[in-house]
Image (spheres, rainbow, N blue to C red):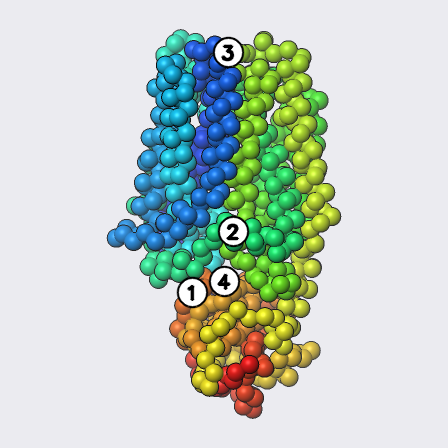
Amino acid sequence: MEKQQTAKKKLTWPQLKERIAFALGNLGHSAFYGALSTYFIVYVTSGMFTDLSPKVANRLIGLITTLVVIIRLAEVVVDPILGNIVDNTETRWGKFKPWQVIGSVVSAILLVIIFTGIFGLAKVNWLLFAIAFVIIFIILDVFYSFADVAYWGMVPAISGDSKERGIFTALGSFTGSIGWNGLTMIVVPITTYFTYLATGKHDQGPQGWLAFAIIVSIIAVLSALAVAFGTTEKNDVIRQAASQKTTIKDVFVGIAKNDQILWISCAYLLYSLAYVVTNGVLFYLFKFVIGQPGEFWIAGAVATIVGFSTAPLYPLLNKFIPRKMLFLVGQISMILSYIIFIFASTNMALLIVGLVLFNFTFVQLVIVLSLTDAIEYGQLKNGNRNEAVVLAVRPMLDKITGAFSNGIVGTIAIMAGMTGSATAADMTAKNIHTFELFAFYTPLISSILALIVFMFKVKITEKKHAEIVTELENRLAKGHLPSDNDKVLTGITTKILAPVDGQLLTLDDVPNGFEGKGFAIQPTDGHIYAPFDGHIKFTFSTRHTLGIVSDNGLEMIIHVGLETVNMRGEGFVTHYVDGQKISAGDLLLSFDQQLIHEAGYDDIVINFFTQPKQMRTLENLQAKSVTHGESILEVIMMEK
């Protein structure tokens, strides 16, 4: 019977449809973000003010880029508020899907309006234009953020299985890459074609940019509708979403208390700033330096192909190469790409090599994994896990670098004379030098600093994390780490049920010994069930260990295997979200016994209590065969 449960289940059509629908959502969502964050600035510098004098146009370009930076930085603070609004939404369609549709439709309409130049208002009154732009852009950004928060917030709502949530996230990231890089391939053909239809000129004029915005907006709305009609929010998981709220204060406090999160964030900020700024100026490189804007699609094609290749390559390489070395390889590739951009950017063959090296990076994957491992580091150091902080840090840093990138790209365009109707023939040696200084030399320095910070200040390696987890488990077992649980009910008996099928043992029977109060079970099955009513307190990033708290306040750790931390979560699947309410007998975790044994580890399930000083002496356990759900002992808590 149990072997049948562990057999691989065939994917049903509704499951496949839901995966496709969710993936389509980020196709349009990322394309919209690319149009807003990268190509809007290109439109502002080259098409929005073509009918105004260069002096007035440059002032308005500077004004808009400054306003965009301020608005997008403010969005970092606003996002937690929007997330709270989404969390508190109750409709018959769920809480996420309505904001997906509303956010996408409203922001799409407003994107089209700003790509009209707000109907040419700048020609009538530049002050009214500035006021109208601020109002429209803020509303646009807020509703785009609603769609963004709702889209990624849906992941735990449409699946309670950790592995399945990982699949949804991977699919969303995959199609997001297509949406983002796809714009690079189509932006010039679309803007040129529709400008030609309107004016007869082969150029990227205001008419072409408006058509581009309309097409992107339609794709974004259709993608949101695909999510709305193709996915289903599971109410049992949605109710747990409120426990994941994070304010901007939580993010900064969590970073400040964890030096490894601080250094990892610093390295990523430096890398991301270089990456986003360079992506933002590639169009200017092709149009004004090389003089071949029609070949700009190559940049998108290279990024897409390299992205498809590196993503699946990472887990394979990481089995043999530590992630710190993979970070080193990625950053060296990026540094080499800048050298090519600086000295050989007009050679198309070498430029393509540079684009390959620029996009051949494992930085984002390494950063996410390093931040995740920093959770246990923070818990060992100061007792705080800060799990929600990890979920918020990278998106927050992306928004910060995106905001600064908008301002930097706009400034580069003005200082290098790459605005209005200028062409490659109008560029002087000084213009090119100014462009290269800010577009390549400065990001080169930023990428080098990112490498230095990560290599010398980030200490969380796979080996170090394994040591931290082992030490953390030992301290938890001995009750040496502080507990934030103030709901311990003294004098109340908690019945402990066997969490897994197998042979019941004492902790003294665990190989190499294990200090603390608790018990162990040599499992005959790879499923862990809740031993009492309560809630999930936390899960280690490697998924082999989870903490649960009973309704009476009894804290218990379930640890699967010896040295299984080194498996980095492979073979472990959780069936809950952190903070979730659980009932005795609920399936919590599945683990692959065969995979653990093949890796050379013992799969013994160790269970210990983290408040040993408050517990009365446990009854003497007898070695025997037990079945999950069977009562094996009772615990009574005393006052401290």
Of 87 and 160, which appears nearest the observer? Answer: 87
Name which residue type carries label 3: Pro
Using the image, determine if residue 419 lies above or below residue 350.
above
Gap between marks 4 and 3 measured at Cα: 60 Å
Type of amino acid at the residue the image marks with label 1: Gln
Foreground tag (4 vs 2): 2
Q: Nearer the viewer, mark 2 or mark 3?
A: 2
Q: Sequence order check: which comes first, mark 4 or mark 3?
A: 3
Q: Quadrant of the N terminus?
A: bottom left
Helix, strand or loop for disc 1:
loop
State the residue position of label 4: 573
> Residue 294: horizontal and vertical position, in percent?
51, 18
- For mark 3, give the secondary structure: helix
The label number, if any, that marks residue 54 in the structure image: 3
The quadrant of the rendering that contains the C terminus is: bottom right
Q: Does residue 210 appear in this view?
A: no
Q: Which mark is residue 249?
A: 2
Give the side of residue 214 with respect to residue 262, left or right: left
Q: Earlier in the sequence, mark 1 or mark 4?
A: 4
Amino acid at circle 2: Lys
Q: CA distance from mark 2 to mark 1?
A: 24 Å
- Secondary structure at numbered mark 4: strand
Density class for disc 1 (Cα within 10 Å; few <14, some 14-19, many ≥20) is some
Any part of residue 447 in sight: yes
